[in-house]
Image (tube, rainbow, N blue to C red):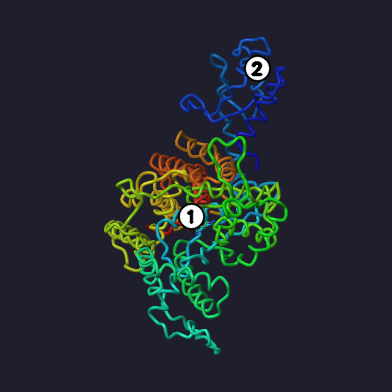
Amino acid sequence: MKKILDVLTNELESAFRAAGYDAKNAKASVSNRPDLCQYQCNGAMALAKEAHKAPIMIANEVAEKLAESEIIVDVNAVNPGFLNFNISPEFLEKYLNDMASDERFGVEKEGSAKKIVVDFGGPNVAKPLHVGHLRSAIIGESIKRICKYMGNEVIGDIHLGDWGLQMGLIITELKKRQPDLPYFDDSFEGEYPEEAPFTISELEEIYPTASAKSKEDEVYKKEALEATFKLQTGNKGYRAIWKHIMSVSVADLKKNYQNLNVSFDWWKGESDVQDDIAPMVDDLKSRGFAYESEGALVVDVALESDTKEVPPCMILKSDGAALYTTTDLATLLQRKSLFGPDQVIYVVDKRQDMHFVQVFRCAKKTGIVDEDVKLDFVGFGTMNGKDGKPFKTREGGVMRLEVLLNDINEEMYKKITGNHDIEEAEARAISKTVGLAAVKYGDLSNQATKDYVFDIDKFTSFEGNTGPYILYTIVRIKSILNKYVEAGNSIEGLKIGKAANASELGLSLELTKLSAMLENAYMELAPHKICAYIYDVANAFNSFYHENKILTEEDKEKQTGWIALLLLTKGVLEMCIDLLGFEAPEHM
Ligand code: ARG
């Protein structure tokens, strides 16, 4: 379906032409004086100079032509040359019914389906998920869903950090604790045990212990570096431990991401491209892109237009080791051969901005990705505590994601059981659903680049711009519809009528903005635009609800029209929260 502003713009264009003017400035926009009119057009002002006429005269002439329009009504030309107008009740009625009868509510897919990789999550194996990973998971999941909805073929890739020093540290610590394990015996010829020599909780304790030791103890650190090197150069026993670390850790990650309603199509990681690095480096050298500088191998990526310094992209350190950058470049090569994406979107902490500037430029310059491939960096800000510093536990430690989600669920549980009598199991289930919405909406409603304060009281509130408020609105609609059906009515085949009053009109106009909003959220990779939209829709719905007695309305035609409008509102809200990655319960 055509976006409502496009329909209005077309109508304006005809009127401008009919009045003898160029139509290029005939653009409709939502009124910035909703007390006066619904829409406006400022085109007459831009024409004044070339037409040698006062803008108000042009506006008047166009207004006259608009008298014939069946879509644009109540036209007013006002000084100095604005056109104020409304859309006709008939057209609005038709537009809403068209939306309601389309399973996509009139949202069109992007013309040509693209292949898109969304690189998000990015946890590091063997380290517990903490709140720092939360934002990438939440924003990435939403961007993935939006891109899919707009008709693209999308791969979500978790891009595990599974190859660095952390592996060497774990192996070193394990060797100290259990030196007799066969993995450490170079002469061992048999089959290694199938069972991992540690559980996930042990693993999560081993890593920080080892990491702390290596910071204080040079010898220990050297051992860990050696272990990393042995692993990377193919030591059999170390590879076997690595596999155990991976399977134990990935199983736990899967469980955690599932709790967040976040999923990935690919579980690839840094380790998957290690064999591609040497040939890639050779190629970059032989084609003259990479050269030696102070012992390291680098590719220049600075541009003359740079306002701040962009250092050369380092491919190999002076000791010959590959870097984070190298791995990301090799990963782009791998994605090209496996999938051939038109676009790759990275959802990563904005402090990695420079890393991605270097990777993107190097990839384009060297042809690792083709010129027309779009590389996007969606850098997000920090989630802070109420003290304005990065979010920590009460004791000042790193907050584990599991703990944070439990805290939210507990808070929701208190609120839900405080409101009314409800069975324990049901209350728990609802708390989980609403709690997740609270966390996700709390995050997504902010522009991604901004830091935000994680405020449990605010996020779990049923009032204001929060996830629970949106869900509460949906549940309210469901409850009205249920009561309507329980009274023996059918909700099939109902038609929305002409708006009968201001609150109904307000809700109707909000709903018509869906297509343009979603297209914009997609183009700008900006889930917060969906949040802002559904907050407006929820507010408009709640005003409508408070001002009209829907279930006791005696005029049956009016009532069925309202029920149809409720169905559309519910459909639109549910579709939007699905794109944000959460859902509404039946009751709450
Ligand atoms: N594992 C990385 C980290 O914790 C994030 C990975 C982001 N993705 C990427 N392709 N570099 O910082």
Which residue is at 63% across, 54% downward?
A: 116
Q: Which amino acid type is shown beneath numbered disc 2?
A: Leu
Left or right of 494 on screen, residue 458: left
| SS class, disc 1 | helix
Check the image and report above or below for 500 versus 277.
above
Q: Which mark is residue 136?
A: 1
Is the distance from the Cβ of mark 2 to the nearest ligand 1 atom less than 8 Å?
A: no
| SS class, disc 2 | helix
Q: Which amino acid type is shown beneath numbered disc 1?
A: Ser
Residue farthest to the front?
Answer: 294
Q: Is residue 269 visible?
A: yes
Which residue is at 62% across, 18% downward?
A: 46
Q: Nearer the viewer, residue 7 or 65?
A: 7
Which tag is nearer the camera, tag 2 or tag 1?
1
Check the image and report above or below for 559 versus 195.
above
Q: Nearer the viewer, residue 397 or 62?
A: 397
Q: Looking at the rendering, in which quadrant would you find the C terminus? A: bottom left
- Residue 281, how many percent across, how many down? 65, 59
Check the image and report above or below for 396 versus 306.
below
Check the image and report above or below for 260 versus 382.
below
Q: Which mark is residue 47?
A: 2
Which residue is at 55% across, 14% downward?
A: 80
- Residue 170, how many percent across, how many down? 43, 72
Q: Residues within 10 Å of mark 1 (few under 14, many from 20)?
A: many
